[in-house]
Image (cartoon, rainbow, N blue to C red):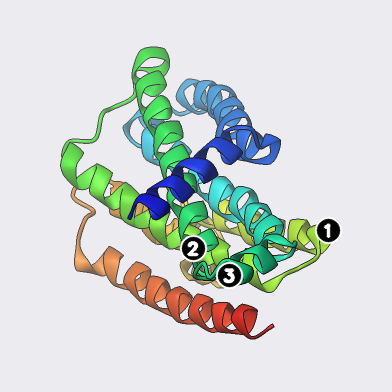
Amino acid sequence: MNGFLYSVALQWKLDIRSKSLLITCYIVPLIFFLLMGGIFTSVMPEMRNTLIQSMIVMSVSMGAFVGLPPSLIETYGSDMNKVYKANGVPIYLGLVTALISAFVHLMISCVIIVLLSLLLFDAALPAQLPAFFFALAIYTIVSLSVGSILGLMIKSQAKLTMIAQLLFLPSIMLSGIMFPIDLLPVFLEKSGHIFPAFWGYRLMLDHGFCFENLWYLVFMFCGAVIVCGALMKRQKAK
């Protein structure tokens, strides 16, 4: 247990010094929030009711799909993988510590967004805070599990950047956080249901924590765990 806690603490320190994680979990999401929060609440005052949920979806999606995978490439695409094997360290330790560290960073970023939303834009606080934060944790874990697949499967940093953007941008544009999704053509509206952002956004809305919005996230998480397990076995066999 002490070794595990030390590994988590070490990963935390490495992530704090990581420019990639700093940009994707803090700088870009917060700049986007400050700009778009002002625009949304000025053009559509009713957006204050869902501003917190919308900006959090963007922040979590960027951190999970763009921020986490490069950290996994650094671990499993380098000599660190050989160090794990040489010292008898479980191969999955790097993945687990990276997930825990990214989860904590994203939670901090989300709390900052909640506080700034209240102070700067007079946003509406979620009516049921325990349910909201529980839904946020579920959505974050699912998004990180999907991001883990990218980091474990793709070995090229350039290819990873391209694929991560192909996953991140549609998940934001088709989730309903930027504009009502029923304004889109039926094909695009249904395509948005593929991404966890669509369901996570609805799960975090007031009175949105229900099986109808939860089942797909659970299904996606179970699928991601199976895929990550298979990729870990492939790493171990190398």
SS for tag 1? helix
Residue type for callout 3? Ile
Mark toward the viewer: 3 or 2: 2
Residue type for callout 2? Leu
| N-terminal-most mark, 1 or 3 | 3
Residue placed most toward the observer, 185 or 17? 17
Q: Is residue 74 left or right of residue 130?
A: right
Residue where numbered disc 3 is placed: 149
SS for tag 3? helix
Query: Residue 41, relative to residue 81: is it above or below?
Result: above
Residue type for callout 1? Ala
Quadrant, the N terminus: bottom left
What residue is at 34 percent from the left and 19 percent from the top?
A: 118
| N-terminal-most mark, 2 or 1 | 2
What residue is at 39 percent from the left and 23 percent from the top?
A: 117
Residue where numbered disc 1 is placed: 158
What residue is at 54 percent from the left and 84 percent from the top?
A: 230
SS for tag 2? helix
Residue where numbered disc 2 is placed: 93
